[in-house]
Image: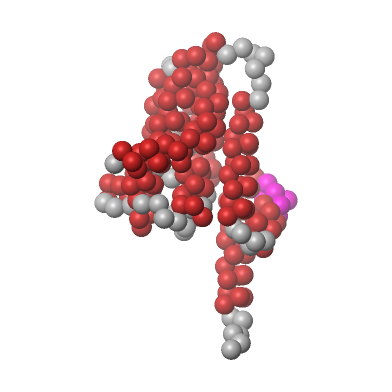
């Protein structure tokens, strides 16, 4: 178990460093919105919704109805439905383990668990990875709520940490494709089309278009006659 935990620490270290400024910024936002400091840790541990949590702070502070919050959560996090198509949940043993792995399937965990280097990872290693990412986020959020008032207003760029983190993960994913140029091209075209046609539902539209394009490519290539 300790060997698996040590390995998962190495697997998650890079993303954990990316979570630190994001969590600090989120915790500071919670207290600056008039909410108690413990709300940052509670929402980070229970909701664990990444970008939706930043949206949730403003909605809670404005006393938005629960129905509106629920609909917003669905629209923002509906991309996780597509993650389930390729996330290696079958390696995780036990109902409790599968339930937690499904619950803690954040963007960063998905990116790490579906890469080329993760094809031999055990279910226990995946669970430790997700648990550590969960702890990184909750811990940094609490620290941000407690220490947010100490961060000078002149400090800028914390909000760019998320963009930088996903840029690195995207580059790693493209590198793992090993010459499969059409896939990133289809992804870029899907994102561009979604931005132009459905700017209000960019993520959902982009994932839908990319899934349709990948299915169409698979059907097209599988129907090609094989020559002896």
Residue 196 colored in magenta in the image: yes
Q: Residue at x 61, y 25 (%)?
A: 158
Image coordinates of residue 88 in percent, x first then y, are: 41, 55
Residue 228 vs 214, above or below: the answer is below
Magenta residue span: 192-199
Residue 28 vs 78, above or below: the answer is above
Furthest-bottom residue in view? Answer: 228
Image coordinates of residue 213 in percent, x first then y, are: 62, 64
Residue 189 colored in magenta in the image: no
Image coordinates of residue 18 in percent, x first then y, are: 55, 32
Q: Main secondary structure of the magenta part?
A: helix
Q: Quadrant of the N terminus?
A: top left
Task: Tell me if 11 is positioned left or right of 211 in this view.
Answer: left
Q: Residue at x 27, y 51 (%)?
A: 95
Q: Residue at x 61, y 81 (%)?
A: 224
Q: Quadrant of residue 21?
A: top right
Residue 159 vs 84, above or below: the answer is above
Asked if residue 77 shows in the view, the reply is no
Q: Residue at x 61, y 75 (%)?
A: 221
Image coordinates of residue 174 in percent, x first then y, are: 62, 53
Between residue 188 and residue 113, name the one nearer to us: 113
Between residue 15 and residue 4, name the one nearer to us: 4
């Amino acid at each position: 178990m300790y060997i698996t935990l040590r390995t998962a620490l190495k697997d998650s270290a890079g993303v954990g460093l990316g979570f630190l400024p994001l969590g600090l910024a989120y915790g500071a936002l919670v207290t600056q919105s008039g909410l108690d400091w413990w709300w940052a840790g509670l929402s980070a541990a229970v909701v664990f919704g990444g970008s939706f949590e930043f949206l949730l702070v403003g909605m809670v502070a404005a006393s938005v109805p629960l129905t509106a919050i629920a609909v917003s959560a669905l629209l923002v996090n509906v991309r996780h439905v597509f993650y389930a198509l390729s996330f290696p949940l079958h390696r995780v043993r036990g109902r409790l383990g599968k339930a937690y792995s499904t619950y803690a399937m954040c963007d960063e965990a998905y990116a790490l668990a579906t890469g080329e280097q993760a094809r031999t990872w055990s279910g226990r290693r995946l669970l430790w990875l997700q648990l550590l990412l969960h702890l990184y986020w909750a811990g940094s959020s609490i620290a941000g709520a407690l220490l947010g008032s100490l961060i000078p207003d002149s400090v800028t760029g914390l909000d760019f940490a998320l963009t930088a983190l996903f840029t690195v993960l995207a580059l790693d994913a493209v590198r793992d494709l090993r010459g499969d140029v059409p896939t990133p091209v289809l992804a870029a075209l899907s994102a561009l089309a979604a931005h132009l046609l459905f700017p209000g539902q960019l993520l959902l539209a982009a994932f839908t278009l990319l899934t349709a394009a990948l299915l169409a490519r698979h059907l097209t290539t599988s129907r090609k006659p094989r020559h002896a």
